[in-house]
Image (tube, rainbow, N blue to C red):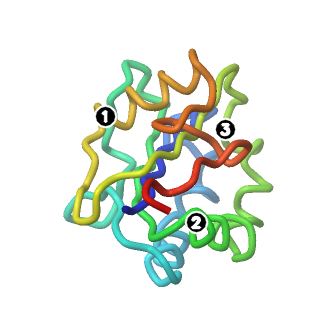
Amino acid sequence: MHLAQFNIAKCKAPLDDPLMKPFVDNLERINRLAEQSDGFIWRLQDESGAATDFSIYTDPNIIVNLSVWDSVDALKQFVYTTEHLQFLQQKSQWFEKLPLANLVLWWIPENYEPPLQEAKDRLTQLQHQGDRADAFSFRHVFERPGS
């Protein structure tokens, strides 16, 4: 089993606004860092390598990130011990604080790329029902099935 990760962010301005320039200018580099990280398997992207044009929400300022990792530890390593952490610490410059959870994790079969609708449904489930084995957060990680 692998770990799926989905998160959303609500931009304070459209991506082509000067306010968002530092975020946009670093996005490719941070994505490349993820792809080179131990345990990285897959991420949602278009032909250009970007994911910012994908949306499943009616609000055009909500951007999505969907990726698959070998383990929770591999994802945590990338999120909290690489340059990504510095990027994360600046998020209030570019993104509005959301009232509900904006990140969800769940276990998936190997060689499976979860569709956006499934990811959105898992996040909605977490937001309304809290951490469960099929939709959880870093606060309450559920073990890989069969472990």
Q: Residue at x 72, y 48 (%)?
A: 91
For label 1, the crowd category at 10 Å Cα-Cα, with few meaning under 14, some 14 to 19 and many 20 or more, is few
Q: Residue at x 44, y 21 (%)?
A: 59
Q: Which residue is outermost to the top?
A: 128
Task: Tell me the CA gap for discs 2 and 1.
Answer: 20 Å
Q: Which residue is outermost to the front?
A: 146
Report the label total. Answer: 3
Q: Residue at x 52, y 63 (%)?
A: 27
Residue type marked 3: Phe
Q: Earlier in the sequence, mark 3 or mark 1?
A: 3
Specify the quadrant of the image occupied by residue 110: bottom left
Mark number, residue 75: 2
Task: Tell me the CA gap for discs 3 and 1.
Answer: 24 Å
Q: Is residue 61 above or below residue 67?
A: above
Residue type marked 2: Leu
Q: Earlier in the sequence, mark 2 or mark 1?
A: 2
Q: Which secondary structure, mark 3?
A: strand
Task: Tell me the CA gap for discs 3 and 2.
Answer: 21 Å
The residue labelled by disc 3 is 95
Q: Position of residue 76 (x, y in %)?
A: 66, 65
Q: Which secondary structure, mark 1?
A: helix
